[in-house]
Amino acid sequence: MKSAGTIVAVALLIAAGIAIAPLAATEIPPAERRSGYSFMAPDTKAIQDDDTANPGMLWVLDGEALWNSKAGATGNACADCHNDARASMKGVAARYPAYDKALARPVNLEQRINLCRTRQQQATPFAFESRDLLALTAFVAEQSRGAAIAPEATAELAPFVAKGRDFFMRRQGQLNLGCTNCHDDNWDKHLAGSAVTQALPTGYPIYRLEWQSLGSLQRRLRNCITGMRAQNYDYGAPELVELELYLMTRARGMPIETPAVRP
Amino acid sequence: MASALINVPKKAKRGEIIEIKTLMSHIMETGYRHTAAGQLVPRDIITSFTCRFNGAEIFRADLFPAIAANPFVTFFTIANESGKFDFEWIGDNGFTETASAAISVE
Amino acid sequence: MRKSHASTRRRFLGLAGSAAAIGMVPVVSLRPAGATPETMAAAIRNVVGTATVQTGKVKLDVPPLVENGNTVPMTVSVTSPMTEEDYVKSIHVFNEKNPQPNIGNFYLGPKAGRAQVSTRIRLADSQKIIAIARLSDGSFWSVSADVVVTLAACTEEVI
């Protein structure tokens, strides 16, 4: 079963014209970067363009309700400390994952929200991919819509960006592919009908038609890692956060679209 | 937690044809999926959606498993007088949700 | 109409197991019989009875090539004056290959002003869909459309 699957996968890659052993990977020049949005069919774009048609907005609404509701032993709502999210959370998502001093490593936006749950509200953290965590993350990130992606370029973060980049470039898994082989070298090709795209995380959490739900960037990454038949990582694993961080540096300067829609 | 997103113009001219857009959060589990262990995932869908204006039904839909998750339904009506639209979604496992929106017609 | 070999293997609603990732590894092999053209014909008979269904008046807008069969935008409109004397009573949409032939029934009346509804549907596979309108004079009108559904890449195992 396993080997049959691999043969089908390789056959599909060849059909898509994706070279299995290309020359050294080349990064995409800034001027040629394109959001996943630009690869979508007009009908899919239309869903993202209209807030009253975008199902992702249902999570944003839920997140707004959670923002204002009291939780945990301290009985504080997010709003009690951060007030109006439109002001306090503006631009925040554009610089995540960010460095957390106490943990001495980067945390993504979901983890950052959960840190406030545990440190500030003395509440139990939300499970990754739970409706509540996705809703709050979407609500916080939506406040940065249109803001330019701007991960901090600090010496503290640099080694983590480098690790994420290494992951992206490294060939791995049964297909012996690196992320770069698809997303840097073959982004203009199609794979079984899907545009490959440049893997720029401009709209997370996204409403993915395939999932019929909102989902995080880590869920998206885990899907691609499964596709590569490579070792996967648990939600919140440092490897995935480093990968997120590197992807955000590749998307530096591009506007946040949350909640984006993707096929 | 079930949210609804309703888009009705707040104001309209008498006799104007207006579009109403509705989005309701719901998984719309088809009842045709199986878990990896081979167990059937029971059906859990919205079966009926109704819109009333000032109490009188103006639009109704029967939904089936082939309607996508988080059902999106749009339709039209003539704005003849000011009043209130009431929306109702009914589904499996006792699901009922309502929402409303006001319009002023001049 | 392009007939893609990949599209015919398109998983619907997870029933054939996930198209796990790039290569398709079926995790579930159970596959209920899809709605065949005969079950679709029976579902249509349920709505129209013995009346004849004429072609025309109805317009069905569905993208000819769909990026993901889970969420396919669809608009049905009917040419009608929408007056108290002459209006569209209902619109019924059917499909050929999903496990069940019905997609939706929409009931409207003269107060709708415009006989047009939109929604988003699921399509198991490349197939034909049919929309039928019942008019206030008791006549039935129909249109059909062919949709090509492509295969999603890099997905995950279902459930």
Image (cartoon, helix red, strand yellow):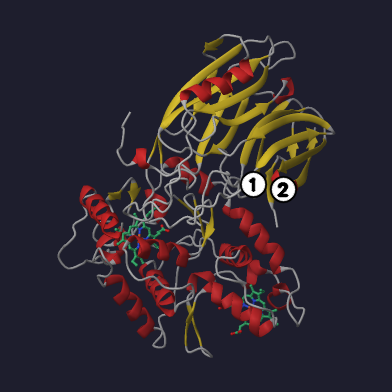
| Picture layout, residue C135 above or below residue B96 | above
Asked if labels 2 and 1 touch by Cβ distance under 8 angstroms, the answer is yes
Q: Find numbered disc 1 in the image and state the secondary structure of the residue it sits on.
A: loop
Q: Residue A168 carries which label?
A: none
Amino acid on which disc 2 is placed: Asn
**Residue matched to label 1:** B44
- Residue drawn 35% across the image and 76% down it: A164
- Residue drawn 63% across the image and 37% down it: B73
Q: As drawn, is A254 to the left or to the right of B79?
A: left
The first of marks 1 and 2 along the sequence is 1
Which quarter of the figure has residue B106? top right
Which quarter of the figure has residue A136? bottom right
Front in this rendered view, residue B42 or A24? B42
- Residue drawn 40% across the image and 47% down it: A40
| Picture layout, residue A82 above or below residue B66 | below
| Picture layout, residue B71 above or below residue A225 | above
Q: Find numbered disc 2 in the image and state the secondary structure of the residue it sits on.
A: helix
Which quarter of the figure has residue B105? top right
Q: Where is residue B71 in the image (x, y as percent from the top left)?
A: 61, 43
Could you tell me which chain the residue with mark 2 belongs to? B
- Residue drawn 76% across the image and 82% down it: A74
Q: Position of residue A167 (x, y in %)?
A: 32, 74
Q: As drawn, is A155 to the left or to the right of A214?
A: left
Front in this rendered view, residue A134 or B48? B48
Amino acid on which disc 1 is placed: Asp
Q: Which mark is residue B93?
A: 2
Classed neighbour count for the residue bearing mark 1: other residues with Cα under 10 Å, few (<14), some (14–19), many (≥20): some
